[in-house]
Amino acid sequence: MLEFAWPWLLLLLPLPVLAWWLLPPYRARQASIQVPFFDRLAVATGQTPQRGAVVVERRAVQMVAAVAIWTLLVVALARPQWVGDAVTREVSARDLILAIDISGSMDQRDFKAPDGTTLSRLDGVKRVVKDFIARRKGDRVALILFGTKAYVQVPFTQDISTAQQLLDQAGVGMAGQQTAIGDTIGLAIKTFAASATKQKLMILLTDGNDTASRVPPAHAADIAHQNDVTVYTIGVGDPTASGENRVDLGVLQHVADTTGGHFFRAENGAQLQAIYADIDRLAPAKLQTLSWRPKLLLFQWPLGGAVAIGLLLWLALLLSSGWHRMRGVGNA
């Protein structure tokens, strides 16, 4: 439908009429011819001299054009626009951080993919996580890689393909050989600090135990809970191993419970795929409905019409004046 962005400007339409009624007429002094025998001429013609004025007559076409031009200019100032039907779109109101362990133990080739092949733990995790990222429609995704240190590989983005490519470039040992679970949760909290979304979800996957953090995982989990960050933990290592190769399932369980998340145990690719599918089901994205009406500006049409009428009137008066001038010369 048609509407005006500034309809109150239409109140300017009667302004010329008010000016015509209330303002004094325009007067201008002009030079005249002095006649030495003016008094005798007035007596001879029987007229009494008095002050007078010459009122320039305007043609009807000029008045009609003036009214049309003023009306079109006011309509253009009111910014007419065509408003289309309402468009509604649902977008995710969730920020998601994927934290992937790339410590030295992730290089062990004991991870069975769903197709039966044996891969290193990191390569197997990459396959599953890349599929999980591909299903993030509307989510803003960030990627944190951690070993001895944790760093943000991908800041929050909706560019899914870029996130997958940067995950694919991750290699074992890039962040050190040890495991820093507590520091990773702390970095995630810091990354979430600039987020305005209500749903903040972190999925932390590791195959080791915390041996390098400055902040204990339990304390980091308490801070995450205070900042409304939910942590889902996934353990893919061997809990009976020793040193860096032993996954601390108790710590992962405590972190998940403290933050209101869930703990999962995965031994192969099929289980890991099922876990990420369960996370989609347990933590569905909160959708935010955005609605707007497309608007097409139309002010250029009345503005162009006013200019066209002005040009046509000027051309018509110019031709009429030239024609009268030529006619007068011909009669002479």
Image (tube, rainbow, N blue to C red):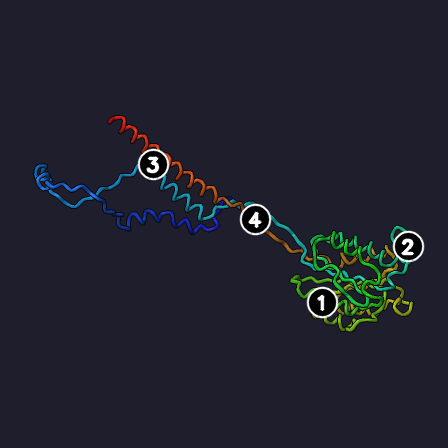
| Residue 149 in the figure: left or right of residue 291 | right
Q: Which of marks 4 and 1 is in front?
A: 1
- Which residue position is annotated with label 2? 118
Q: In this view, does 187 lie above or below 125?
A: below
Dot 1 falls on a residue whose secondary structure is helix
- Which residue position is annotated with label 1? 189
Which amino acid type is shown beneath numbered disc 2? Answer: Thr
Q: Is residue 234 visible?
A: no
- Which residue position is annotated with label 3? 61
Q: In this view, does 232 lie above or below 40?
A: below
Which amino acid type is shown beneath numbered disc 4? Answer: Arg
Relative image position of residue 214 (x, y in whole percent): 78, 73
- Which residue position is annotated with label 4? 293
Separation of marks 4 and 2 at Cα, in angstroms:
53 Å
Separation of marks 1 and 3 at Cα, in angstroms:
74 Å
Dot 2 falls on a residue whose secondary structure is strand
Separation of marks 1 and 2 at Cα, in angstroms:
35 Å
The image quadrant of residue 71 is top left
For marks 4 and 1, the one nearer the N-term is 1
Numbered badge on residue 262: none
For marks 1 and 2, the one nearer the N-term is 2
Label 1 packing within 10 angstroms: few (<14), some (14-19), many (20+): many
For marks 1 and 3, the one nearer the N-term is 3
Separation of marks 4 and 1 at Cα, in angstroms:
37 Å
- Viewer-proximal residue among 168 and 268: 168
For marks 3 and 2, the one nearer the N-term is 3
Separation of marks 3 and 2 at Cα, in angstroms:
91 Å
